[in-house]
């Protein structure tokens, strides 16, 4: 694990932890992975396995832990296929090892601040390893940060090197600053924050301190996903069917708006397969046959994400190699 001091000399100065894995140490291609809120560079979490109802109708939930995170498995698959790349995985501010003297930044979450962290780390890695091409993989909050980073005119030097983007369970300003009523979690959180005092923070997600100020900042970017689409970067969007945090209906609407602008955008629907088990002490077992946990952590969803994302990245890297051979 290495650390880079970003936004040096400003109030936003912070230590960002990152990990470099060299599939090909001499490669000029970079695969950059940025995780979701509450996670770290491994993208490992627990996933919902089943919902159980007892004789009184009371519901309980059971969970299993991921043995390997999505980014662990994606990294492993790229290396196994001898990908011509260097892999960089970062810990976002307040996540994993990205702390200062073991302490967190407890100010209002500024996604613009986090996007600047990403840009500075990316720029540093690009310069250090003389990177010519970048493939970005983001999950949830990491996708929103990346959209802000790529649409910032100050980062054109980075954008010019980005050849593809993979977004898992993408989060947009629309979800947080302009939620629909049927987006139950986001809508309730929005109402709670906007009707509260300015210093109120919603801290349910570890490492993320959402507040009214957070939402007002994001509201300045109502068409962020469209601005991202206008960059015309080949893109994969993974949408969980049954995602409780980012409802599929809303996620699909926004994804289609992106694809209308950028036809080179692939929308991938991911659904869990039912796992049929029996428990003697339960009256009813509800199998979640068409559900995918947010960020695709269950084994079936994770497998699809890792398999298809790695194929997408490997194909792009192979195309780059062919172009270089031609010239």
Image (cartoon, rainbow, N blue to C red):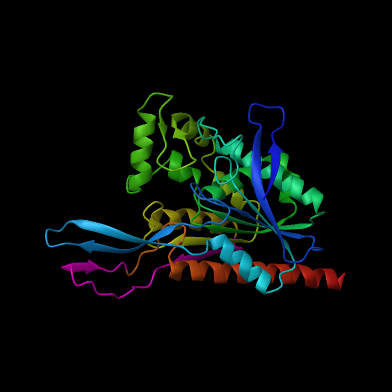
Residue at the location (16% across, 62% down)?
54
* Res. 305 visible in picture: yes
228 within the magenta span: no
Q: Is residue 225 left or right of residue 301?
A: right
Residue 265 colored in magenta in the image? yes
Picture coordinates of residue 81, whole percent (x, y): 67, 74
Choose top left, top right, bottom left or bottom right for residue 301. bottom left
In the displayed structure image, the side of residue 327 where residue 287 appears, left or right: left
Query: Farthest residue toward the front?
Result: 101
Q: Does 203 sit left or right of 99 as displayed?
A: left
Residue at 38%, 30% in the rendered image = 194
At x 15% / y 68%, what residue is drawn? Answer: 283
Decide which of 165, 62 is in the foreground and name it: 62
In this rendering, is residue 253 above or below 269? Answer: above
Q: Residue furthest right?
A: 327
- Magenta region: 263-288
Magenta span: chief secondary structure: loop
Quarter containing the C terminus: bottom right
**Position of 170 relative to 6 (above/below):** below
Can residue 180 be seen by looking at this rendering? no
Q: How many marks?
A: 0
Q: Position of residue 92 (x, y in %)?
A: 58, 44
Relative depth, front residue between 52 and 101 = 101
Give the residue displayed 42% in from the left and 37% down from the top: 203
> Residue 173: horizontal and vertical position, in percent?
49, 43
In the image, residue 61 sits, relative to residue 206, either above or below, namely: below
Front in this rendered view, residue 277 or 159 = 277
Give percent across and percent down for residue 95: 55, 44
């Amino acid at each position: 694990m290495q650390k880079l001091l970003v936004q040096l000399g400003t109030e936003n100065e912070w230590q960002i932890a990152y990990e470099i894995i060299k599939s090909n140490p001499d490669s000029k291609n970079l695969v950059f992975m940025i995780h979701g809120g509450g996670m770290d560079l491994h993208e490992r979490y627990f996933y919902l396995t089943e919902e159980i109802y007892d004789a009184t109708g009371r519901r309980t939930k059971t969970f299993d832990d991921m043995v390997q995170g999505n980014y662990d498995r994606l990294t492993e698959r790229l290396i196994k296929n001898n990908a011509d790349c260097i892999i960089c995985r970062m810990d976002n501010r307040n996540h994993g090892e990205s702390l200062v003297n073991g302490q967190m930044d407890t100010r209002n979450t500024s996604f613009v601040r986090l996007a600047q962290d990403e840009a500075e780390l990316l720029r540093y890695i690009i310069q250090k390893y003389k990177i010519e091409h970048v493939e970005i993989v983001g999950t949830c909050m990491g996708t929103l940060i990346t959209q802000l980073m790529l649409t910032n005119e100050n980062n054109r030097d980075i954008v010019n090197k980005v050849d593809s983007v993979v977004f898992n369970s993408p989060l947009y300003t629309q979800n947080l600053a302009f939620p629909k009523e049927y987006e139950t979690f986001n809508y309730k959180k929005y109402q709670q924050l906007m009707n509260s005092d300015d210093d109120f923070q919603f801290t349910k997600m570890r490492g993320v301190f959402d507040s009214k100020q957070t939402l007002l900042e994001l509201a300045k970017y109502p068409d962020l996903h469209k601005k991202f689409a206008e960059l015309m970067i080949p893109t994969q969007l993974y949408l969980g069917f049954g995602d409780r945090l980012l409802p599929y209906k809303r996620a699909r609407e926004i994804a289609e708006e992106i694809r209308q602008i950028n036809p080179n955008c692939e929308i991938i629907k991911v659904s869990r397969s039912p796992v049929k088990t029996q428990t003697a002490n339960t009256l009813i077992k509800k199998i979640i046959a068409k559900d995918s946990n947010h960020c695709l952590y269950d084994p079936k969803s994770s497998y699809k994400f890792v398999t298809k994302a790695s194929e997408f990245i490997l194909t792009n890297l192979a195309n780059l190699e062919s172009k270089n051979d031609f010239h």
